[in-house]
Amino acid sequence: MSSSVKMGLGSDAPVVLCSFVPGLDPQDRSSSPAKFIRLIRAINASTDGTLVKGEQLKQKVADLFLPACMFNHDMMEMSLLHQELVEWLNRWDVGVITDRSTRTVMALAAQLYQDADRVQTIKMVDEYKH
């Protein structure tokens, strides 16, 4: 993951913005991962200085991507996207907890959604076969 420095977001002080998978071109991906990349990149790309962080960012991502979209076949085949999403969310103070005993995708499934969506997501990820 890389960062870029942008000037003029409400002051002259530089603001470091974290790019989401800058090396991947959405046009090279199937429609589901491409849409995912474009939408995630757009979240904190506004020039008005408004940055979404922490729980608000976590909720925004969960609202943008229902479990069936976040963990569909195309997305599961590109596990890099889930790993990068966890790193990107944590750079924006979300605090997704990962450890060696849990796959990153399962940690994301368990911590991004709430209640029935959480249960559905964990089951979906657990049952996925490559």
Image: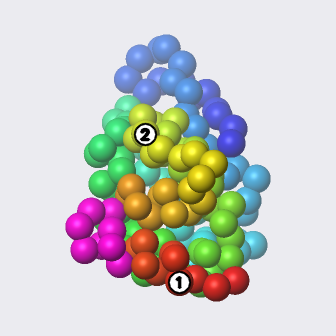
The correct choice, above or below, for 124 with respect to 22 in the image is below
Tag 1 and tag 2, C-beta contact below 8 Å: no
Q: Residues within 10 Å of mark 2 (few under 14, many from 20)?
A: some
Q: Position of residue 82 (x, y in %)?
A: 58, 60
Which residue lies at the image location 48% right of the left edge and 72% below the top edge?
A: 70
Give the x, y percent position of residue 58. Answer: 36, 51
Residues under labels 1 and 2: Cα distance?
26 Å
Residue range (magenta): 113-120
User: Residue 45: in sight, yes or no?
Assistant: no
Residue 118 forms part of the magenta stretch? yes
Q: State the image quarter where residue 120 is shown.
A: bottom left
The answer to whether any part of residue 78 appears in the image is yes
As rendered, which of 36 and 115 lies closer to the eye? Answer: 115
Q: What residue appears at the point 61 percent right and 27 percent down from the top-left corner?
A: 5
Q: Determine the residue located farthest toward the left in the rendered image.
A: 115
> As rendered, which of 91 and 108 lies closer to the eye?
108
Q: Quadrant of residue 44?
A: top left
In this rendering, would 122 be left or right of 98? Answer: left
Q: Amino acid at mark 2?
A: Gly
Looking at the picture, which amino acid does disc 1 mark? Glu
Q: In the picture provided, is 42 more to the left or to the right than 26?
A: left
Name the spot of residue 107 as percent of width and height, x first. Answer: 49, 57
Q: What is the number of the mark on residue 127?
A: 1
Q: Quadrant of the N terminus?
A: top right
Residue bearing mark 2: 95
Label 2: which secondary element: loop
The local secondary structure at tag 1 comes to helix
Instruction: Tell me, yes or no, whether the highlighted magenta stretch contains residue 19.
Output: no
